[in-house]
Image (spheres, coloured by chain):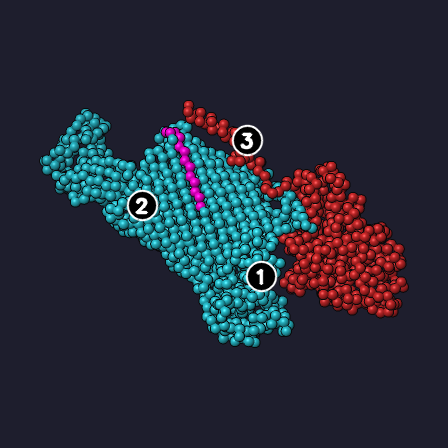
Chain colours: A red, B cyan
Amino acid sequence: MKNIKFIYKYLIFLMVASFTSCQLTKDIDDYENLYTLNAFDAISDANSAELALVGVYSGFKQRSTASGLPELFILPSILSGVGTNNNPNDVELQGYVTNNPIPQGSRSNLGAYTRMYDLVNRCNWLIQGMNDLDSSEFSDPDRHAEILAETKAMRATANFYLLRLWGQFYDSNSMYGIDVRTTPALSNEAFPRNSVTETYDIILEDLDEAITNAPDFISKLDMSKVYAKALKAKVLLYKGDYTQAATLAKDVIDNSGSNFALAPTYAEIFDNTTDATFNSTEYVFITGGGPGVFIGIENFWGGFFAAPSPTFTGLIASGVTDVNGQLISYDGDRVSSMFGFTNFKFGRPYPRIYHLRMAEIYLIFAEANARANNSVTSDALGALNMVRLRAGATTTGGDGFETYPATISLAQFLDAVRIEKMVEISGESGEEWFDLVRYHFVDGFDVTTIKESATNPDKYILPIDLQTIEAGGNVIEQNPGYN
Amino acid sequence: MEIKLRNVLFFFRKKLLQIIMRTFIFLLCTTVFGLTSENILSQNAKIKITEDKVITVDEVFEIIKMQTDYRFIYKSDLFKDFPKVFVKRGTIKANDLLRESLSKGDFNFNFTTKNTIVIKASVPVVLQETNISGQVVDENGVPLPGMTVYVTNQKPSGERINQDFLVRGTATDFDGKFTLLAEVGYYLVASGLGYEFHTEQITADKTIYNVSLKERASALDEVIVVGYGTTVKKDLTGSVGSVRSEDIQQIKSQTIDQALVGRISGVHVNSGGGAPGSGNIVHIRGLSQLTGDNQPLYVVDGIPIMLNPSFSEDGLGISVFGDRENPLLSINPDDIERVDVLKDASSAAIYGSRAANGVILITTKRGKRNQAPQFNFSYNTTIQNPTDKLNYLNAEQYRTFAEGWAPEVLANSFFPEFLWPVFHPNEYQIVNDPDNYFGEADTDWQSEILNRNAIWNQYNFSVSGGSSSTNYLVSATVNEQEGILIGNKFTRYNFQTNLDSQLKDNLKVGASVNYNYSVNKQSGIGSLADANYRPDLGIFDENGNYTESIGAFELNRINPLGNEAKIKNKALAQNLFGSVYGELKLLKDLKFRSQLNIGVSNDKSTVFVPSFTSRALFNEFFGQGGASLQVQTTESITTSFNNTLNYNATIFENHKIDAVGGISWDRNFINLEGQTYNGFPDDEILTNIQSANRVSEFSSDATEFGLNSLFGRINYNFKDRYLFTFTGRVDASVKFGPENRRGFFPSAGFAWNVHNEGFFKENNIVSNLKLRASLGRTGVDNLPAFSFEPKYISLGNGDSFYNGVNGIAVPDVPNQGIKWESTDQLDLGLEFGLFNGRLNGELVYFEKNTSGLILLVPIPAETGDSEWSANIADVSNKGWEIALNADIIRSEDFSWNSAFNISFIKNNVDALNGGSLLRSFGIAEGEPIGYIRGYEVDRIAQTQQEIDDLNANAPSGMYFSEVALQPGDYIFKDISGPGGVPDGEITSDDLTNLGDISPDFYGGWNNTLTYKNFSLGLNFQFVEGSEKQFSPIARLGFPRAYENQLDLILETWTPENPDATYARLGSGTHSPDFGRVATSKSVGDGSYIRLRSASLGYNLPNDLISKIGLNRARISISGNNLFTITNYPGQDPENVPAINPGGGTTGLVSDSGLSYPQIRTFTFGVDLSF
């Protein structure tokens, strides 16, 4: 009898203990992951939304535990010959040097592809969270739409970077777009690729929302209406919609206010000694590094991964365009007379990734306008010469580092714009490579004149690493030429 | 005294001769093997007794004579006054009747003619009576109450005393004392459950008989702890190995893991280094985790301890920088009563998802009931030295090397000549101005950084005892241990107390508390590699300052005494373990027990690096110049709440059931924090956090995880012949994804005690024969909690920090199906005991098949991650274990017990299924875990012609495309090619398995010899076929002229030394593929045999010490690692990497020469009880 009483008492104790969630008898489902927020309901107020937005921005930085950034910005420059790598044992990098990328076993390629999808995934988590969050949570109710807009501008950026390196962006009829994801990844399920047109549509849709709702200006490290517009101009240029591209680029040049303008001198753009220069008017959007904020671009251009190739530096030092007898050299001293390419553009201690800057907008406008009008308009010529003048070009009409004369032919003009980009923004985000590819598919430009080994147009875009294709059960189709 | 004999009905006289003969044999035969069977006389001859009556022995003979043909001849008064015999109506076996009748005396039997037996008294009939007294104590001098002491008139021939020869007896009192009336010439016997029996003849001149009883060793009745209960060895169906306290103490170590070395088959212990308190590596039955440490679960009195809990994605433990103190410091080896190791699934499955690497159950000492307070004081002092030193060059040899090597460096420089003074300052000066470069000294820096004859003092005081219902133990230990490297001191205080009390007949409660506090101070000198400073420089220059030279990265480097020795590491650990329990007897056979355990382990380590040290100067490169202070704290709380019902009953005589069922809640919380502070105003005093200029690094990690479980075990025993064990556990854990939230871990074991079978003939040879088999499933759950859950976090390493704000992000794709790694294990065993238990042995075969091993597995990168952790790979372990234990000599004064064990284990990675590791070396399909991948060296090229010929035959024109071969380089073996046949050149097809970390076999040979009061222990350990890369050999490819070198460089090829062991200095073939690939020359053979411990003890004679009030006094000297036979090129074959995050097993494939030296010790000890 005594025992029974005891058991009875003990059972009561046990029940009380478990019903009151005593820590000793805590139910498994009551445990919580410490210092983490459940992804489904983490975005619960203005503060968490802002933090998650920072988390998306940080996705453009180097990730300490995975590769892909800043490789994303350097790989096209190796394809174009601006950068090279001298380590014969690095099979993957040699693949880019020789324009024959390896289709499997890559690190940089798979890493860069993954990092952009990581960014897309972070955007999708935040967008899902924002959709469940009321704008009244924000002291400024417009901030809700702004955050969404910033996120979508970044998603568009990532999707654009994916499309131009792994998709046939130059062919609007192509099925080889990218897998456009708009919801967070919760499983390892793979989905087929969207067509190129579908991909462009989604990128432009995101950018349109950003143009409408993004902040006018916070800093050059943040998304803005101007950036969305500028990127849209660039995307349209890639897509071949030159009229719209020119209009938008013009809009950016003319109507962006005092925060966005060509910097007075070329050298100041690359003043990496301080973060005070992060808001240079030149920049449209940059990712800024510094102590504890690693972006890696300075290391990666420092030789072990890539270094400026002598072929490239030789070419721009000696290259001239003969415009009706006037020998106009490609470059004055933008590249060669500075401290040297690596110390100069990608030096410490505050390196930055130049996603988009005003000089490029001028050159986008120049090309788009000329192509839209099928002639070298004075606006187009003016835009190109603006960039050259800033770089120190003279207008004597003689030979040398001169502005281009109005007599320049359309074909020469388009090539001059391409060359200008190659000099002006060489190595910054690989733009000169995508120009080569576009010119090839639009004008039949012979890429081998710039990069001898780039003989196979199929390999102007990268393979999707076989590892990920196989991991997805071959749902994703490999780019032609890599099977 | 009357003797009752019953059921006398029939008799068969023909059998009587045999009966008598057997009686004779029984009575006279005493052999070393102690044939004591009481049934030796069992025959069918029966004597019929017609009625109950009391008769004399003479009358017994009459009855036998009447019913058989036998005649007896004896002195007519021989049985006068002999006790009468009570016989009962019925039949009785003749031998029983005779034996019972004569059992009170000691007689000689002589056969004269057939059927005639002459009986003579063998002892004087008239006996001198004497009063004797004495005390019974155990080996430690602790009085033993309740022991049986009796006088017998037969010299006992074995443990099982025939009660019939018992004259009179008593039990020892509370203090182990007794008094007894005895007859001179008779025998005094002392015995008790759990102790070996003791006997001696009673002599006329001695009245005090102090007896020391040995605890019964290797007995089948040994109580084994099996998790949530105990059992006895003979009832086991699984593989459990045990080590007891006296064996533990032979190994000098601050933690228990080391003491298991060489003791238990299937348990491989590798020392983690000679640093005080360092953790060791214990692998039970091979390796089955690809990520993680493969170490067992430790359970100390019910509190689980996990050595390397997993935080990070790659399963490699702690992600925060810095060190955590060894969690096993929470238990002092001296406080441990016994260690039981659960090896197979039948025994380990009760721990379910944590048990696949085996379970080590640690039981601490407790007081004993009915015992007077027993005070014990022990003092040990230990002298420590390294097992070996490295062989560095002396100053002259160094100068020869440097002068030869420096021009080579310059000749191969990437820099133009005018920059040589800047980028190669040492080499430039060695070549151009050697006499001003080299100093005159000849300093042996190893001697300078070693703390020779490091002292370790250990004091322990304890008191234990108990009343009839309560027992207690209080113990305190102080350890002061110097390390063998300068600046290293470890201080440890430990208190332990426990109490058990039988409050009522049916209610028992108990509690224990164990507290450990340790401070481990160390300088920056952590290995003998710090002695690579230039030997031509003295310690001080002419101004009395520490000498300086230019070191790596053109930074000035002060010599180690003024440099690394000035770094101050301090690790402080506090551990508190406590438990309370109540045990209630509900019914006769049913007990309920509830136990709550709490363990708190906190540690804090700080490292202060003064600004002038090389480490601080190097940190300038990372913008963290100046002095720095690294702080790491770990805070860990474990609670374990267990409720069990235990049913133990015998049903219908033959069916024994011992069942336990329970429910448990285990909770763990671990929090780690680390910061680095930089820029201190000075290096000596203002070194506190507040004085720092800035925080340069900060990180933290925390996890809370729970494991809620139901478990049960049923042991069923039929007639002691057939034993069945069924075990099951259901674990629900926050580590397992929603699709696998609960894991079920069943096992079944069967054992057959063949020797208890009716058909098993009693014989002198085989006393025990058991066959057993078990099959079951266990798991390993060492994965991060909640990895299946998508979560927003601030990423590590500042990855989510941007534009002045630390953001949050969802970093990866959660695997909802993540779960434990599952191991199915088969265990087949044969146990035998021969010669009355003097030779015991065990032969076991096991197979462990582990599936669902966690690796990184590719997933579609469109998810934002290119791989995730998933249960994918398969690994198997197969092996044999053999253990033998023999009492080679067992006599009163001299005994020699020898135990030998050997284990053969074959490990194989069966399938990776596309998975990989973040740090992916040492693992490949079809190879053992921790294998070394590399090129086999065929020879060293002697001439350029030889190389040209090879190149000419190579398809690519280069025999080894990575390196332009020169004479003096290794020529690797062309093993294979793209077509699977040698292709004339060295490519990745020629990479082969150069060895692996797992031994082919290992074991121990442990001996205990006692002679009177002396005891000698000799324990050997051996390991065969364990390989690891010895990095200093690979580094012969890029020696530094400004550092001293090992004498390995004297073995390098030169044109004058064409038969050298190693390729030329600076050869690119020393470390192919940037050191990612080994060569067969850089692989060291880690096989060894070592005298792990030897100890000699002497118990002072009782007569002597009792006069000064002591119960026991023992002095001992012992030594560890006294000699080692090995070919290993490094300091010690057991060396492992000094830094190995999370203790990852695959990290063990290389010995970089940076580990704390292994130690050799001599200990002098005194142990007093009073």
Q: CA distance from mark 1 to mark 2?
A: 56 Å
**Residue beneath label 2, please?**
B1169
Furthest residue toward left: B76
**Residue beneath label 1, please?**
B618
Under mark 3, the amino acid is Thr
Q: Name the secondary structure under disc 1.
A: helix
Quadrant of the drawing holding the C terminus of chain B = top left
Determine crowd level at label 2: few under 14, some 14-19, many 20+ residues with C-alpha closer than 10 A. many
Under mark 2, the amino acid is Ser
Give the magenta-colored segment's residue range.
B504-516
Q: Name the secondary structure under disc 2.
A: strand
At 38% across and 34% down in the image, what residue appears? B501
Q: CA distance from mark 1 to mark 3?
A: 55 Å
Furthest residue toward top: A1
In the rendered image, residue B258, in percent from the top left (x then y), is placed at 43, 51
Whether residue B514 appears in magenta in the rendering, the answer is yes
Q: Which chain letter goes with mark 1?
A: B
In the rendered image, residue B586, in percent from the top left (x then y), is placed at 41, 28
Q: Which residue occupies the foreground of this view, B1110 or B32? A: B1110
Q: Report whether residue B65 is seen.
A: no
**Residue beneath label 3, please?**
A20
The answer to whether dots 3 and 2 both sit on one chain is: no
Q: Quadrant of residue B1001?
A: bottom left
In the rendered image, residue B416, in percent from the top left (x then y), is placed at 64, 72
- Mark 1 or 3, closer to the camera: 1
Q: Which residue occupies the foreground of this view, A420 or B986? A: A420
